[in-house]
Amino acid sequence: MIASLGRVLTKVFTKTAPDPFVIAVGLTLLAAILALVFGTYPGATTSAEKLNAMIDAWRGSDGLWKFLAFGMQMSLILVTGHALAASKPIRLLIGRLAGLPSSAPAAAALVGLVAAIFGLINWGLGLIVGALFAREVARVCATKNISVHGPLLAAAGYMGLLVWHGGFSGSAPLKMTTEAQARDVLPASVFESLETGAVPLSDTLLSPMNLFISGGLLIIIPIVLWLLTPKHDNEITPMPLDDDATEIEHIAGEVSGFPDWIERSPIVVWALALMLVYAFVRFSTKDGFMSLGPNEVNIAMLALGLIMHGSVRSYMSAAEDGARGCAGIILQFPLYAGIMGMLASSGLINDFSRFMASVANETTAPVLTLASAAIVNVFVPSGGGQWGIQGPIALQTGAEAGVAPAKMIMAVAYGDQLTNMLQPFWALPLLAITRVKAREIVGYTAVVMIVAALWMVVGLLVF
C-alpha cells in the first residue's frame, strides 16, 4: 500500500512539478499578490502606494539582499560539507557501507539512515554524503544484479534535510545560544522574558524531547523507505551512472618545482587546520560548547576537511566541485529573501502566526507552531531566515501559553525541516550529483514527511 502511494504521488509530481527555480519565481509572484491584496502598509492609502511600498520592501536591505551574510554561511556549510564528504576517509567509508545491502529495500533503507545520521552532524555533510552514497549504492547494486529504483535512492539521500534542524547545524537553536545572537533576532520584550537571555543547546538539541524525536526518526525513515521500494521490474528506473562528475581529480606525476610541491604537501593545510582546531577549542573553553553557532560549525568542518584531504590541491579540488552546488543557493536565496521581505513588511506572516497563537494553549501551541512553520518554510526555505521572522512570535506565543522557550524553538525547527520534503530548494546539489529530477523524488519524500509529521506531533505532545 505504501509503495503504491509513493508511485502515485511520484507520477503526479512528475507530470506537474516544475524546476525549483521556476517554483521560486512562482512563489515570488504569489507572495506579491498576497501582499498587495491582504497586506497592510502604514501610510499607504492607494493601490499605487501599496505597490511602491511592497517593491521597496522587496528590493531593500531587508528584502532581496537580507540573506547575503547568512547565504555565505550556508554556502560554506555546503562547500565544507561537500569537501569533507569527498575526502578519502569518508569515501572509503561510503564504499564499505555501499556493499552491505543485499536487496533493493535494504539499499533504500541504508541510504536513508546514513544520510539522516550525517544530516544530524551537519546538513551540508548529510546532503552530500547522502547523494554520493546513493550513487555508490546504485553502482554497487548494479554489479550485484540488484535492481534499485534511482529516484527512491535519491529521495533516501535527501533524508538528512528531514532531521537537520534537530542536529548540530540547526539554525534556530544555534542562533539562540548567546545573548548577542538572541538580541539580534528578538524584540526587547521577548528577549527580556527569557530567564537566561539565551537558550543553551542542552535545552534544545540535547533535550530529552529532541533525542526522542530525532532518534525516533532514525528508525522511522529506513522503515518507510523499505516499504516504499517498488516490487516489480517495470516500476524501476535505474539511476544514471555514466560520466560520474563527483570524483575528485588528483593530478599524479612528478613534482615540478616548489609551487607544485607546496600544493601537494600537508604543511599548508595542517598549519591552517591546527589554527582552526585551536580556535574551536578556544571557543569551547571560553564560551562553552552549548553556545555553538554556525560560524563554529564551519570552523570545525573546514578543519576536518583539511586534515582528511591532506593537501591544498586535493581540498581545493573538492571545494570547487562543491561550489557548483551553490548555484541554486546563490540565485534563489535572494528570491526567497525577497519573499520574506514582502510577507514580513505586509504583516501577513505576523497575522498568520498570531492567528495560530490566538487559538493555542499550553498543549496545542507547539503543534500549531510546527504547522505554521511547515507552511512558512514552503515560501521561505531558510531555517535562519524563517527563525528571524517566526522566532519572536513563537516565543511570545509560548510565553502567553506557558510553554518553555526551548520547546517553541524546536517546534519551529521541526516545522521548518518537515516541508523540506516538499520544497526542492535544498535538494539542488543532490539532484546535480544523482542526476535525478526533483519531480521524480517528491512523491517518495512526501510519504516519509507525513509519517515524520505524526512522530513529531507525538513528541511535542508527550514532552
Image: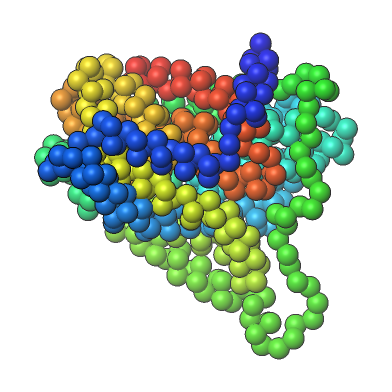
Residue 313 coordinates in the image, percent (x, y): 65, 71
Residue farthest along the bottom direction in this orientation: 257
Q: Residue at x 40, y 35 (%)?
A: 30
Q: Residue at x 26, y 52 (%)?
A: 56
Q: Residue at x 37, y 48 (%)?
A: 337
Quadrant of the rendered structure where residue 131 is?
top right
Q: Nearer the viewer, residue 199 or 57?
A: 57
Q: Residue at x 58, y 41 (%)?
A: 19
Please determine whether, in this image, residue 268 is positioned above or below residue 323: below
Residue 384 coordinates in the image, percent (x, y): 36, 45
Please determine whether, in this image, residue 311 is positioned above or below residue 61: below
Please determine whether, in this image, residue 86 is positioned above or below residue 252: above
Residue 105 coordinates in the image, percent (x, y): 73, 24
Q: Nearer the viewer, residue 192 or 343?
A: 343
Q: Nearer the viewer, residue 421 or 25?
A: 25
In the picture, which quadrant includes the C terminus? top left
Indicate left or right for 8 with 216 as reference: right
In the picture, which quadrant includes the N terminus? top right
Is residue 390 at all visible to an observer of this figure?
A: no
The total number of labels drawn is 0
Indicate left or right for 365 with 193 as reference: right
